[in-house]
Amino acid sequence: MNLKKQGFHSKFRAASDHLATGLAIAATLLVVAPLVAIFIYLIYKGASSLNLAFFTHVPKPVGEDGGGMANAIVGSGVLLGVASLLGIPVGIGGGIYLAEFGRGTKFANAVRFTADVLNGVPSIVMGIAVYSLIVVPQHHFSAFSGGVALGIMMIPTVTRTTEEMLLMVPNSVREAALGLGVPNWRSVLSITLKTASPGVITGCMLAFARVAGETAPLIFTAFGNQFWSASLNEPIAALPLQIYVYAISPYDEWHRLAWGGALVLIILIVFAVSLVRYVASRGILKGAS
Amino acid sequence: MGVGIEVSNLNAWYGSNHTLQDIQLHIPANHATALIGPSGCGKSTFVRCLNRMHETNPIARVTGTVRIGDLDIYKDASPVEIRRRVGMVFQRPNPFPTMSIYDNVASGLKLNGFSNRKVLDEIVERSLRNSALWDEVKDDLRKKSGASLSGGQQQRMCIARALAVDPEVLLMDEPASALDPVSTSKIEDLIFELKSQYTIVIVTHNMQQAARVAEKTGFFLNGRMVEFDSTHKIFTNPSDKRTEDYITGRFG
């Protein structure tokens, strides 16, 4: 009787163990499946339109075969460059303030709250805001305004991750630097920030990858361009914009190019993020075993 | 060379907590002085007042005078200048985790803008020799991270790092309490070597350690300095009943 009961219990335990493991595996699959599905579908739909012309030519007029997205690839690079130049320094500076100088002050709490709200502002609103701040006074769309819109969107993510990462640096490391007679600002930049840099870089990359695919903030700012332009002062093409325009067009040829553009966009993001992480990790590990 | 330290009417607070009360003390140059007492008696706060680390805590406050050599550290100089002259070794080894052994030792100089490679090389070697670590690490100074050393080695590296900026005073806040006995005895040997060149103030929970390394010993209790005398006298014939109770293990 007793043994039987035990047998039942151990079977029950084994079963619930299997059930929990199974649920965890199922959840993992649910997370990974959409990503894999999207990627496979993009390759299936887009790979066929990728050829040399795609990377070297500008779009052809409707009805003409061929043409590519070279201008949009370069345009995305320009926009993301401007965005990073604005978003990363401002974001890291804000994070340093929150973690190292303003800890516990009312102003810091206000900044933190603002950053969280800014993170939730719909990206189309960001586009309209920059439109009225830069495009309207200048009387023309421009790559610069598009970069600013994307850059502002990067700030909250960069700020908050920088803050979190700096707070994870043990206080003993700060004390070691101060105890050597290193001025506080120098200690923050050369010791604390450097110690936190792997996490800070990850935060920057997250922000970068997020805005790289943004379309809405660019509609009112960078505007898009069917021709070559790398000037900050003129409308510029961008991959997400180009994909958007092509995808809603009625032409099969353009649909194909839109798929190709989406695939290239994802590959470029993965490539850029991996490159930065690789370079950064080498820089940091120099000296570490 | 080390310089003497003259402390008068030193009071310190954390928030409303009066952690140091009316400390008067003369710490002689080029000797090791030990500070003993139960946990929370104020001895760590006291050494942190000697290089103005105390005030890095925003709720901390301090009054009174501390003269190091001919310098009134709360009047005549900035905390940054003081800390270059008064080095500190902390309870737990705190290497800079991203730096090699070499960079850790050179950090105090490099971060203050000193960049002459040849002189840096010499200072790093001399500091590591002074901290008895050179032979163990000389082959991978730049290859190994400071954080990859053992705890005892890390602590000796931290001592080298403090020595590299050429201080006059070396404060040690329980420098061996996180280390094993072998590493501890190495640190003690080191203190013995170093005290001819530096004024050393060492906080310790270990009374044998105080007896081994220090000429002078101060006993702290509840934020006050109960007794300060030669180490021999403190451990054999203390004048205060409370000191006697503490060193004979009746409390604390």
Image (spheres, coloured by chain):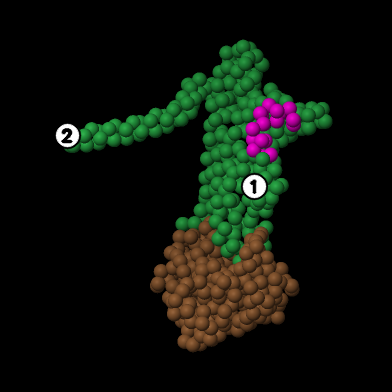
Chain colours: A green, B brown
Q: Secondary structure at mark 1?
A: helix
To which residue does mark 2 refer? A1
x and y, in percent, of residue A3 in the image: 18, 37
Q: Quadrant of residue B224?
A: bottom right
x and y, in percent, of residue A128 in the image: 73, 27
> Of marks 2 and 1, which one's residue comes earlier in the chain?
2
**Image quadrant containing the N terminus of chain B:** bottom right
- Chain bearing tag 2 is A
To which residue does mark 1 refer? A95
Instruction: Give the residue drawn at x 66%, y 59%.
Output: B58
Same subunit under labels 2 and 1?
Answer: yes
- Chain bearing tag 1 is A
Residue B212 marker: none
The residue range painted magenta reads A114-130
Q: Secondary structure at mark 2?
A: loop
Location of residue A53 with respect to A170 vertically, above or below: above
Depth check: give the residue in front, A71 or A91.
A91
